Amino acid sequence: MAQKQSGKRATKKRQTKYVTHVLPKLKLIEAWARDGDIEETIAKKLGIAYSTFNLYKSEHSELSEALKKGKEVVDVEVENSLLKKAHGYNAKVLKTFKVKEVYYNDDGRRCESEHLESRYDEVHVPADTTAQIFWLKNRKPDKWRDKRETELSGDGIKVELAGDIKNWAK
């Protein structure tokens, strides 16, 4: 039979998984976001459901700030890489060459020896048109998106055209 505690009911407040699983790992969460982990993966690593993770994001600003701070670093790096690729760039590449030496020994015989040498060579990586298109479509969608909406009106008739620009030329 269960013992009664002198008329008082024992109430122990249960800690949420936010306190036990998330709060102690905010710096780690920021690092995971910086490393490119998606939120579903971060939730798994924390041992909580993704729906719970989303709830915690909306309730706890320090969690959403940690995610935002981690993602900003990676986003800037990717933007810089995309811009670099859109412009083209020079890069140093380590190349290894086989070098053949021809010499004559003391007896006057022709001899050969081979060895490998490595040197850095500067190469030009040309601009990537796919990167340029992606950049322009996202940065200037009003000028560069594939679909445009045009409105024509006259004599009380209003016509709205929407569609793929490629098909208009046909």
Image: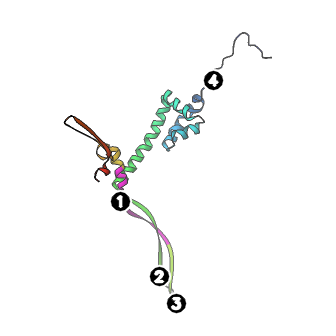
Mark whose residue sits in front, 3 or 2? 2
Q: Quadrant of the N terminus?
A: top right
Q: Quadrant of the C terminus?
A: bottom left
Residue 107 has which mark? 3
- Asked where in the image residue 23 lies, by quadrant, the reply is top right
- Three-letter code for the amino acid on which mark 1 is drawn: Pro
Callouts 3 and 2 close, C-beta under 8 Å: no
Disc 3 packing (10 Å; few <14; some 14–19; many ≥20): few
Disc 1 packing (10 Å; few <14; some 14–19; many ≥20): few
Q: Position of residue 14 (x, y in %)?
A: 63, 23
What residue occupies the far right of the structure in this picture? 1
Q: Which residue is mark 2?
A: 102
Residues at marks 3 and 1, CA–CA distance in whole angstroms: 53 Å
Residues at marks 3 and 2, CA–CA distance in whole angstroms: 14 Å
Residues at marks 1 and 4, CA–CA distance in whole angstroms: 60 Å
Residue found at x 48% / y 36%: 67
Q: Is residue 120 above or below residue 28?
A: below
Counting residues from the start of the chain, the first of labels 1 and 4 encountered is: 4
Q: Which residue is mark 4?
A: 14
Residue found at x 38% / y 63%: 123
- Three-letter code for the amino acid on which mark 2 is drawn: Val
Disc 2 packing (10 Å; few <14; some 14–19; many ≥20): few
Answer yes or no: is residue 22 visible.
yes
What residue occupies the far top of the structure in this picture? 7
Q: Is 122 or 32 nearer to us in this picture?
A: 32
Q: Which residues are magenta?
A: 116-133
At mark 1, the secondary structure is loop
Q: Which residue is mark 1?
A: 126
Magenta run includes residue 34? no
